[in-house]
Image (tube, rainbow, N blue to C red):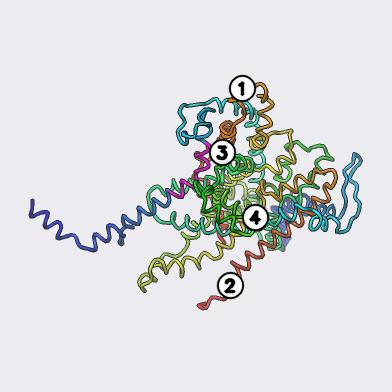
Amino acid sequence: MNLKKLRRNEMKASLREALTGYGFVIIWVIGFLAFMLYPLIQTFIFSLNSVTVTLSGINLEYLKWANYTKALFADPNFVEVLITYAVQTILSVPIIIIFSLIIALLLNVKFKLRGLFRTIFFLPVVITSGPVIVELTQQGATSAPGVANSTTIAAFISSLPPSLRGSFQFLLSSFILILWFSGVQILIYLSSLQKIDKSIYEAAAIDGASAWESFWKITLPSLSTTTLVIAVYTIITLSQFSENAVIKYIGNQTYNPQSGIGYASAMSFLYFIVLILLLVIVYFILGFRPKNRYD
Amino acid sequence: MQNRLQVFFKNIQLADIKGFFFGNRSGYGLVFTTILYLLLLAIGFVYLYPLMFMFVTSLKSPSDLLNAMVQWIPTQLYLENYVRAFHVLDYPKTLVSSIFVSVVPSLIQAVICSLVGYGLARYKFWGKSILFGLILATFIVPAQNTFIPQMLVYKRYGILGNILCMLLPALSGQGVRSAVFILIFYQTYLSLPKVLEEAARLDGASDWKIFMSIAVPGALPAYIVSVIFSIVWYWNETFLTLIFLGGKIQTLPLQLSQFVWAYENIYPAGMENIFDRMNEAIKMSGTFLVILPLLVMYFLLQRWFVESVERSGITGE
């Protein structure tokens, strides 16, 4: 004990601090290697092979990029499911952002029952799970009441090019569902709204700015980082939702004895690439802006 | 009397009337408030429509379902749907295993993530920014890219279908959305004052002792938030639960996803008269029973849920 203490004191303070810090985070590093990095690399190796699981172990047969070319060019379903996912995500993200911003602005006003409405708008976060959503969608409970069946809408949809038709139908039939994904986003917006300095608004009002002007010139610019965070969060939540068609497709293919694990791995990497592309697009739209003139 | 009224009306200025309807320094005004409430009520209705639809439908008797006149108010209080859904879900048993599968990993996840968050917030060491990058990366990588090798390893060691498949990742900070919880704890510990901890260090307390007796009690709210959020996310997680626990441990959402199949096992289609076959009312009862525990938890603990995001500091600074 004495010796240990002595050694501890001889150590440089910064080194000791670093070592203690590593002590706190080491378990995460181990977990990262075991449950993230190793499986990720292994999945990549699988994706380049034909994988058969036997009683004695796993047999790999090197295929080069065959699984990828199969997914992209031979499989009639995968590319379609992937594009549908991307289009639906691109359509849903702005809806969620705008909706959550509007609700946050409304909830930022001080009035009675504010807590109640906040509770209501956060509720879906708690109860949204894949099977529940499936049941609700099957019963038609997730379409905006009265809108989905109207004839004007039907006429509008049939006038669209076929490639967009499905996505717009999705928008209508699961409109509420899309809104249900905005619970966390509303709260994030709300907390950043409350952090904007009130005195800026007062100064603008004295200079004769209307509420409308101060919204566009003060509120929105202050929320730009938040919007980026929200967009990224939304994309990730949507892409990891277990009823996502791509995820279901990959999950089913995993157990397919014909194609199996190797093919599913290749598809999951393609899916990952699409996800990253979506994030990059969003980053460039929301995060990349000309430098503020007043800086 | 006449005189008084005259005085009263004389004293009302145009500005007062304007203020009453359109707002002034002291309030928002009647028109604005009315519009606000109407807007929120309308959006709130649309927002809760699926839930109301589910609840009303679940109370409908078969004849109510067929009757186009009955939309929002069932003609009778019909609870048979719930009785059947209760049996089909095997409710008590599934509920207990659902709670088990969501609570145990959540507790472990909160403890581990708080350790990591504390380490990141309080100590300087080389590679911290790399570590942050990796933590954020784990949030982005889809589970599809990592589950197959995990599954194969679990299978080799014969723990597939065992709760250990969920516990091991949680035990090393790789559970469901662990990255979010690490960030929550990181922010919490950054915002707590360091003074007490430094004083304790001068008095000779070890790092571990400081963490346990000063840092943890100070961050109690973050623990509560993390545990309840984690419970919700583990409860609603079906992709990994299905693959790792597949069939051995049945949770409520999983049982719901095979509701029709389970129903037909208990009440075979041929044995039942046409009115008692599977219908949407029974399905909705099942769905309601599945979310009921979460609803109860939400309304009991809603303060923690709603405040949580403000604490988490994921708002971008």
Circle nearer the N terminus (3, 1): 1
Q: Considering the numbered disc 4 on the image, is that residue within a helix, a strand or a loop?
A: helix
- Left or right: B138 in relation to B310: right
As measured in the structure, the alpha-carbon distance from the residue carrying label 3 to the one carrying label 2 is: 42 Å
What percent of the width, then of the height, locates residue B204?
63, 52
**The disc label shown at residue A236, or none:** 4
Residue B250, relative to residue A102: is it above or below?
Answer: above
Residue at (84%, 40%) from the top-left corner? B156
Q: Can you say which quadrant of the picture contains the C terminus of chain B?
A: bottom right
In which chain is the residue bearing label 3?
Answer: B
As measured in the structure, the alpha-carbon distance from the residue carrying label 1 to the one carrying label 4 is: 46 Å
Residue at (66%, 37%) from the top-left corner? B257
As measured in the structure, the alpha-carbon distance from the residue carrying label 3 to the one carrying label 1 is: 34 Å
Q: Amino acid at mark 4?
A: Ile
- Left or right: A116 in relation to B129: left
Residue identifier under label 2: A289
What percent of the width, then of the height, locates residue B8?
14, 56
The answer to whether one can see residue A16 in this image is: no
As measured in the structure, the alpha-carbon distance from the residue carrying label 4 to the one carrying label 3 is: 23 Å
Judging depth in this view, the residue of A24 and B207 nearest the camera is A24
Confirm or deny contact between disc 2 and disc 1 (CB under 8 A). no
In the image, the segment drawn in magenta is B42-54
Q: Amino acid at mark 2?
A: Arg
**The disc label shown at residue B294, or none:** 3
Q: Amino acid at mark 3?
A: Leu
Q: Amino acid at mark 1?
A: Asn
**The disc label shown at residue A101, or none:** none
What percent of the width, then of the height, locates residue B132?
68, 60
